[in-house]
Amino acid sequence: MNKELENMIQGKLYRSGDPFLIQARRNARLLFEEYNKTSIDEFQKRKEILKKLLGKTGENFYIEPDFKVDYGFNIFIGENFYMNYDCVILDCSTVKIGDNVMFGPGVHIYTAYHPLEFKKRNSGYELAAPIEIGDNVWIGGGAIINPGIKIGNNSVIGSGSVVTKDIPDNVFAAGNPCKIIKDIKNDV
């Protein structure tokens, strides 16, 4: 495995300007560019492109164009996944999405971040931290999920929220920064 890729996935400082990573991002862009140009009638072609782009998918999933990623191969989605228009996933680390998950339009997921110390930041080093989204989660439109976040099973993130801390199971959370608003009773 490429050393910079290994560092990136392990949460260590890495250089995004590494030739291997540049080529991997280029490959992803070519695939999502092709995907975003498809017609609604090209359902099978869309599915084939996403199977090439993403690390793992379930059998039943749907992603509305436009959709953008950094690498694609670090994204793992479960069954019955739906993503609305204009979503972005910066997958420098792993993004694991459970079963029965829905994203509203314009959801952004960021695993990438930069060192706080300006000398390290200016040197070209970057960092990444994984994101995990449990089963039966709904993320409202325009929400931003920051690096290193875990969202628990059966939870809902309100539209426009900026998630900066882990969210437990069975809650509705919203705001900037995102906070728990109430428990969700899932006994229906």
Image (cartoon, helix red, strand yellow):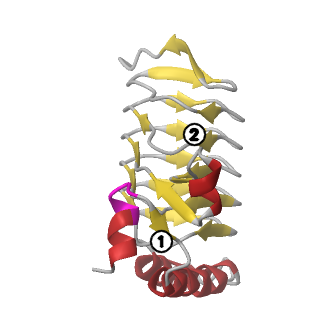
Residue 31 got which mark? none
Give the secondary structure at mark 1: loop
Question: Which label's residue is closer to the chain start, 2 or 1?
Answer: 1
Determine whether 24 is above or below 134 in the image. Answer: below
Q: Residue at the spot x=39%, y=73% of the render?
A: 4
Secondary structure mostly seen in magenta is loop
Segment colored magenta = 8-12
Measured as percent of width and height from the top left, residue 72 is found at 47, 71
Q: Amino acid at mark 1?
A: Gly
Local crowd size for mark 2, using a 10 Å CA cut-off: few (<14), some (14–19), many (≥20):
many
Task: Using the image as rendered, state which of residue 54 and residue 58 is in the foreground.
Answer: 54
Q: Which residue is mark 1?
A: 72
Measured as percent of width and height from the top left, residue 159 is found at 69, 34
Q: Which residue is mark 2?
A: 139
Determine whether 21 is above or below 172 in the image. Answer: below
The answer to whether residue 98 shows anywhere in this view is: yes
Give the secondary structure at mark 2: strand
The answer to whether residue 58 shows anywhere in this view is: no
Local crowd size for mark 1, using a 10 Å CA cut-off: few (<14), some (14–19), many (≥20):
many
Quadrant housing the N terminus: bottom left
Q: Amino acid at mark 2?
A: Ile
Q: CA distance from mark 2 to mark 1?
A: 20 Å
Measured as percent of width and height from the top left, residue 89 is found at 56, 59
Determine whether 36 is above or below 90 in the image. Answer: below
Task: Using the image as rendered, state which of residue 147 and residue 84 is in the foreground.
Answer: 147
Residue furthest out toward the left: 1
Q: Which numbered disc, 2 or 1, marks the residue closer to the eye? A: 1
